[in-house]
Image (spheres, rainbow, N blue to C red):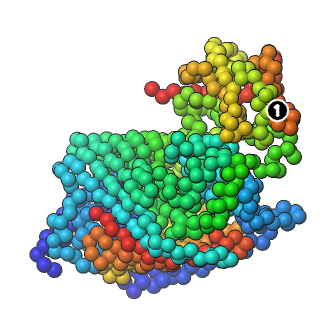
């Protein structure tokens, strides 16, 4: 193959590729600004304001969740609408664990603000690549996020009481295998919980023997707590580290504990078993040597 | 060509011939030269610290002008067992998006230093890649390596970048963003690698980025590449088990040299259970080595953030001129245009950039 042929081939390759790819950008028909299908009434999101719903709709969903979503979310921080609040508010950052990602009432000491403003102790400014490959958030945009945090970082108003109290996620759960004893199990809800209804020692972990019929071979007491920075996340702490094995977390049959939100709505974490106990989560601990 | 340049060229030829397979620095250089990643880099999967050959290449073959005393001016070796290196990128950029005020700024993109300590020659070593600026220090890679990274099996343990597709200089390329595997997302675990003749293969077992806060789940990543002097092809796959939802990624990539132009192509598809979506991304890059020290990079990219939704695709086109006047110094100027749905300003931005890149 001579040089001229190769050059012609290269030019053809460029022309073909550009022609193929140029036609591929979507025209956005039937989609909202985030590229999602429009709801039937075709409503558009309101402009950015200092509330979580607006920040989610205008910032987290269209910009942040491009990377911070799903199974590859950097630092485990998922910023899609279903997960962002519970993984932001009152949760220690993984890069600087002494700082909460969002510390209600204190934007200066909220790690998300430091990352957005570009003066965090670790890592680069967010959104990733700004200002080289995409614009940084403007000062006025960050000011609205600051204002939301100053206001106490409340959840979206729509999520507070208009929908029934429900569990949004449990970690670990679904027969999940964890490679180290989990320090706690987190049960996240869509509403803030009423702490006065919680009995803090009404749950325990049960280690089960292998086999078709669950046989409890060890019980580990659990303590229930709720972070004051995030009243929507129930944390259940084992009294001692869990050794390797198959576990389930149950609410005691004799417990008078109720899971209810500040509006009085109650929720059942699961159907009681034959002993009247409710299994919240089942998981395996695989402690590596 | 003077005597010293002749000597350098001779050294390069000898080193290249001694290698199991020839090799480069940025992936387009590897394709242009027909090299595997480990020919120029200490890390067998590419990027980061340059080895003896990589430094000599950077001093002699890459720049427009070869400085006479550059051959012995910097070897990267502090002692016989300790090698260091680094990259500093600083730039000026201007972003313009519809209905949005333009932004322009000077920025220190990154200053990274690398170190490799050989404990047992050709068998045991420790490697570190640390970003020291901007902001505070952040460890990118730190691992112990045992085995032969040029011909045979090796194992890494610690924190490192995952092997998946082209290890591009631009981490915001669609193929890197959609797969979530890039040089911004190192992970902790172990890697078993194999290098022999035209073959490179890696198998990684790591935590998985999404499991950083849960202490649960894992990620398995594997890649196989077959490299010939004017072409190469690779296949990569990754599966993450996570409480956030499982995620599976597959990719094919290839390189081809046609005269002075090196072509890079990659296609990836992702299924993420937590998003309930299947995503796709593609890349086609042409690097035209106009003459020594001058490279024109043209890139066309495609991204579909949800295969089940129509009319939401994005494309991005870039033209970047790279001028390497002297050893260890590169100037880059470029223009990128994003095309996406018209109702999203960010998906339709334009970026102008000028970059100064110093490395050693």
Identity of the residue drawn at 53% across and 41% down = A98
Depicted B20 relative to depicted B212: above or below: below
Q: Quadrant of residue A250?
A: top right
Q: Chain of mark 1?
A: A
Q: Quadrant of residue B168?
A: bottom left
- At which x and y percent is residue A183? 58, 29
Element under disc 1? loop
Q: Is residue A161 above or below residue A61?
A: above
Residue drawn at x 80%, y 69% is A30
Whether residue A143 can be seen here:
yes
Q: x, y percentage for residue B187?
A: 47, 46
Check the image and report above or below for A5 versus B130: below
Residue furthest to the left: B3
Residue occupied by mark 1? A260
Label 1 environment density (alpha carbons within 10 Å; few <14, some 14–19, many ≥20): many
Q: Is residue B128 left or right of residue A119?
A: left
Residue drawn 65% across the image and 18% down it: A221
Which quarter of the image is occupied by the N terminus of chain B? bottom left
> Quick one: quadrant of the C terminus of chain B?
bottom left
The spot of residue A269 in percent (x, y) is 79, 30
């Amino acid at each position: 193959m001579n040089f001229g042929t190769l050059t012609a081939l290269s030019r053809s390759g460029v022309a073909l590729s550009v022609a193929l790819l140029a036609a591929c950008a979507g025209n956005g028909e039937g989609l909202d600004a985030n590229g999602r299908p429009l709801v039937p009434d075709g409503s558009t999101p309101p402009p950015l304001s200092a509330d979580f719903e607006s920040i989610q709709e205008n910032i987290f969903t269209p910009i942040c969740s491009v990377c911070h979503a799903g199974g590859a979310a950097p630092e485990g921080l998922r910023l899609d609408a279903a997960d962002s609040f519970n993984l932001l508010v009152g949760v220690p950052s993984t890069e600087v664990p002494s700082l909460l990602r969002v510390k209600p009432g204190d934007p200066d000491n909220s790690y998300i603000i430091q990352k957005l403003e570009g003066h965090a102790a670790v890592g680069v400014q967010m959104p990733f690549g700004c200002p080289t490959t995409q614009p940084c958030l403007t000062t006025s945009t960050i000011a609205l996020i600051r204002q939301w945090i100053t206001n106490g970082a409340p959840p979206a108003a729509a999520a507070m009481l208009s929908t029934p109290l429900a569990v949004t996620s449990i970690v670990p759960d679904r027969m999940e295998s964890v490679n180290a004893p989990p320090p706690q199990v987190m049960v996240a809800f869509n509403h803030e919980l009423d702490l006065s209804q919680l009995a803090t020692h009404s749950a325990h972990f049960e280690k089960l023997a292998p086999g078709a019929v669950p046989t409890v071979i060890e019980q580990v007491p659990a303590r229930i707590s709720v972070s004051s920075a995030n009243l929507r996340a129930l944390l259940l702490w084992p009294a001692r580290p869990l050794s390797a094995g198959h576990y389930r977390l149950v609410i005691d049959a004799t417990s008078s504990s109720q899971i209810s939100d500040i509006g009085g709505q109650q929720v059942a974490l699961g159907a009681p078993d034959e002993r009247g106990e409710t299994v919240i989560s089942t998981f395996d601990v695989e402690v590596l040597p | 060509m003077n005597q010293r340049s002749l000597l350098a060229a001779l050294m390069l030829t000898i080193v290249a011939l001694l290698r199991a397979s020839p090799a480069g620095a940025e992936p387009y250089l590897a394709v242009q030269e027909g090299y595997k990643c480990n020919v120029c880099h200490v890390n067998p999967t590419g990027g980061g610290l340059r080895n003896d050959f990589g430094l000599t290449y950077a001093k002699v073959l890459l720049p427009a002008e070869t400085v006479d005393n550059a051959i012995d001016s910097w070897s990267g070796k502090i002692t016989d067992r300790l090698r260091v290196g680094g990259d500093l990128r600083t730039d000026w950029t201007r972003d313009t998006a519809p209905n949005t005020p333009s932004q322009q700024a000077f920025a220190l993109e990154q200053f990274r230093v690398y170190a490799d300590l050989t404990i047992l020659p050709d068998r045991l070593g420790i490697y570190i890649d640390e970003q020291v600026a901007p902001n505070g220090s952040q460890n990118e890679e730190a691992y112990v390596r045992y085995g032969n990274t040029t011909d045979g099996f090796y194992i890494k343990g610690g924190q490192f970048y995952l092997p998946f597709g082209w290890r591009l200089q631009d981490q915001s390329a669609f193929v890197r963003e959609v797969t979530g595997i890039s040089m911004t997302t190192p992970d902790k675990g172990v890697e078993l690698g194999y290098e022999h003749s035209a073959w490179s293969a890696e198998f990684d077992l790591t935590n998985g980025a999404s499991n950083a806060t849960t202490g649960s789940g894992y990620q398995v990543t594997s890649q196989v590449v077959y490299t010939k002097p004017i072409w190469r092809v690779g296949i990569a796959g990754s599966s993450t088990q996570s409480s956030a939802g499982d995620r599976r990624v597959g990719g094919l990539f290839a390189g081809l040299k046609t005269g002075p132009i090196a072509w890079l192509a990659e296609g990836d598809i992702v299924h993420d259970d937590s998003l309930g979506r299947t995503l796709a991304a593609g890349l086609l890059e042409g690097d035209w080595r106009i003459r020594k020290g001058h490279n024109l990079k043209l890139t066309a990219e495609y991204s579909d953030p949800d295969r089940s939704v129509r009319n939401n695709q994005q494309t991005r086109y870039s033209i970047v001129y790279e001028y390497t006047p002297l050893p260890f110094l590169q100037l880059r100027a470029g223009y990128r245009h994003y095309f996406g749905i018209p109702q999203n300003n960010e998906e339709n931005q334009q970026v102008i950039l000028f970059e100064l890149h110093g490395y050693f």
